[in-house]
Image: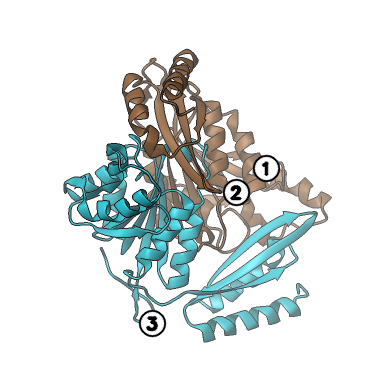
Chain colours: A brown, B cyan
Amino acid sequence: MAQETSAGGDEVITAAVLVIGDEILSGRTKDRNIGTIAEHLTAIGIVLREVRVVGDVTADIVAAVNELRARYTYVFTTGGIGPTHDDITADSIGAAFGVTVDVDARAVALMEPAYAARGIALTPARLRMARIPAGAALIVNSVSAAPGFQIGNVFVMAGVPDIMKAMLEAATDRLRTGPKVNAVAILVHRAEGEIADLFAAHQRAHPDIAMGSYPSFTDGIYRTELVLRGVDKGRLEQARAELVGLLTDGGFL
Amino acid sequence: MAQETSAGGDEVITAAVLVIGDEILSGRTKDRNIGTIAEHLTAIGIVLREVRVVGDVTADIVAAVNELRARYTYVFTTGGIGPTHDDITADSIGAAFGVTVDVDARAVALMEPAYAARGIALTPARLRMARIPAGAALIVNSVSAAPGFQIGNVFVMAGVPDIMKAMLEAATDRLRTGPKVNAVAILVHRAEGEIADLFAAHQRAHPDIAMGSYPSFTDGIYRTELVLRGVDKGRLEQARAELVGLLTDGGFL
């Protein structure tokens, strides 16, 4: 994985998300994990660079995992670690890393008391959820016990949003993080075409601040949200205050 | 693009979606287009095979477009075609195809009457939205006039969900479609671990029907949705009816 450095000399920690599941590609299930992971990574100082969604196809999962883990500091996968035949993520990750996948005693030890407490038998089907690639560390699942796992720089999590969130929280302590990117927004009640020239000139004057414009049109009212993002809070506030001044002078605020 | 054929001998029409935008990767904006496009393509007989999200970075957009358009029948992009400096999709698509990108008279002709009717000037900033790669066909935008475009097998659409939907509808007439994949679902009020063995055996007995299991747990109740998908409605109904019988015999329904 190529190491990146920010303008300030800090290492930039990058990530990709890989969503695994036919149900997302068919449109039957609407993904809710991408946004959750994106927000979380941004908040802790990891830059999400890419997201992919692939179906329940071993070759597609293996290819995506191997491409993404070579390119980014971390890869977070969601989906495909349940007990049914269509849950092929653990085996696919094992194939990607060239390691065996077997029922893991540590995973069984996490599941046994939780299942016993609920009066549920650890059937062979449920033990599929304890199948972990050799060399992986477990990710605790505080919701329903069956763990996720980390192998190399790849974090394998459930697709059910509540369980994914619990695993993401549990994995966070292990992540190296870089400088946090701060964001500020200015809402303008104009179409973005009206402020585009002013905004482009402002971006040119502040190359270290990333500036984006996000329009919406509801109830007959144009709204444009101008978002400024940067690591240095002082420079970000300076760019924000100047932009408010320019917008005010232009009669847009 | 490699041509695929279904078991029934029909050509399989495949697609990828490429979502373009820093705001999705930062988590600030939650994507709502992937699910809409996925549902639409499934309904008309196009198989969505992959989704990617990349940021507002020309090299990343170019690489993704060129990889995906070589691999699938169609590529649908969303985002980055507005009037502001961070809207770099048209130029990136031009770079991917190795063609120039200029203000297009056909696009201006679509925008002029709509802007005149709203009493809005077609400023240089707004004319950025009329910049179209050479050789592209326009995609009409019935919401806000500024068009999307199609070049080769790539359909370039807006990121604002209402506008994206209008463009997707407008583009649909141009799409070749394959056999529609039908889906049926059975809701079981059990954890999926309980029916996993039965379900796996049923999948083995019906290899032409794709079967997936989607669990949820809310208000203390386990629910598992078993989804069967296939082109042939007769065989799908047969597999569904048999599964209902097996679940009933097992005491799960």
Q: Which residue is mark 3?
A: B8
Q: Chain of mark 3?
A: B
Proximity of marks 1 and 2: CB atoms separated by less than 8 Å: yes
Q: Nearer the viewer, mark 1 or mark 3?
A: 3
Nearest the camera: B174 or A161?
Answer: B174
Nearest the camera: A155 or A105?
Answer: A155
Q: Which residue is mark 2?
A: A158
**Circle 1: is it few (<14), some (14-19), or many (20+) Cα within 10 Å?**
many
Q: Which residue is mark 1?
A: A141
Query: Who's the residue at 72% across and 45% down the image?
Result: A143
Find the distance from the CA under tag 1 to the CA under tag 3.
Answer: 43 Å
Q: Is A76 left, or right, of B9 in this rendering?
A: right
Both labels 1 and 2 in a single chain: yes
Query: Who's the residue at 67% across and 42% down the image?
Result: A141
Find the distance from the CA under tag 3 to the CA under tag 2.
Answer: 35 Å
In the image as oriented, which residue stretches furthest toward the top? A234
